[in-house]
Amino acid sequence: AEHLFCMYFAFEWFVRFKSFQRKRNGLRDAWFVFDSSLVFMMVAETWVMTIIMLTLGADGGGGLGNASILRMARLLRLSRMARMARLFRAMPELLILIKGMAAAMRSVFFTLTLLAIIIYVFGIAFRQLVGDLAKNEDGYPYFGSVPSAMHTLLIKGTLLDGPGAVVKQLGNESYLFAALFYVFILLAAL
């Protein structure tokens, strides 16, 4: 995978280099110089150091040590993400969307936590009330244990993947159970 990334970035650098009408202008473009240094370090680490290590017969701990300096330089590749700053300056709407998503993550987290609590409480209730009475088409109980009850409530009651079969089985036992399942669906939909 590292060799594929190295080939891709080297190819990207080559295309950008060829796009300059006067090749010396590449030295005036700060982003191109930055990318050139990153690609150079990546090629040196991925291909050149591998060849040197194989030539010297080092198995990771020989002549050049474990090349920990180059492993530290690998972190510099993360600085390629600095190019995103240019994208955010060009499209401020994108930055607004990202800030909105970050602000919404807290409310989404608490909504999912509340949903998990509701599923847990109703899972215990259905396990105690219904137990092994309601079974699916394979004969396994929908509410045989608390985890299976929670799974049934998540799939059939929250994501609504065929709740009719569960309601039919619950209605055969008691209409109160079916009504309780509908109350769960209404609460989970909020």
Image (tube, grey):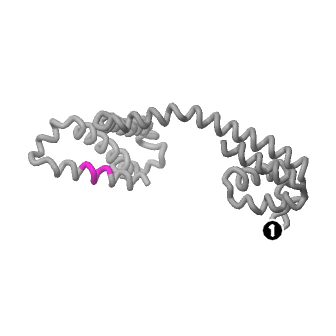
The answer to whether residue 69 is visible is no
Image quarter (top left, top right, bottom left or bottom right) of the N terminus? bottom left
Which residue is at a point 73% across and 58% down the rendered structure image? Answer: 163
Residue 167, percent from left and from top: 79, 58
Q: Amino acid at mark 1?
A: Glu
In this image, 39 relative to 18: left or right?
right
What secondary structure is marked by label 1?
A: loop
Dominant secondary structure, magenta? helix
Magenta stretch encompasses residue 127: no
Above or below, 157 relative to 85: below
The answer to whether residue 175 is visible is yes
Above or below, 42 relative to 167: above
Residue in front for this viewpoint, 171 or 103:
171
Residue extent of the magenta highlight: 9-13
Residue in front for this viewpoint, 3 or 120:
120
The quarter of the picture where residue 178 lies is bottom right
| Residue designated by label 1 | 137
Which residue is at a point 14% across and 47% down the rendered structure image? Answer: 20
Which residue is at a point 75% across and 61% down the rendered structure image? Answer: 164
Residue 34, percent from left and from top: 26, 37
Residue in front for this viewpoint, 161 or 164:
164
- Numbered circles on residues, count: 1
Residue 152, percent from left and from top: 76, 54
Image quarter (top left, top right, bottom left or bottom right) of the C terminus? top right
The quarter of the picture where residue 26 lies is top left
In this image, 107 relative to 185: left or right?
left
Residue in front for this viewpoint, 7 or 182:
182
Q: Residue furthest bottom?
A: 138
Above or below, 9 relative to 114: below
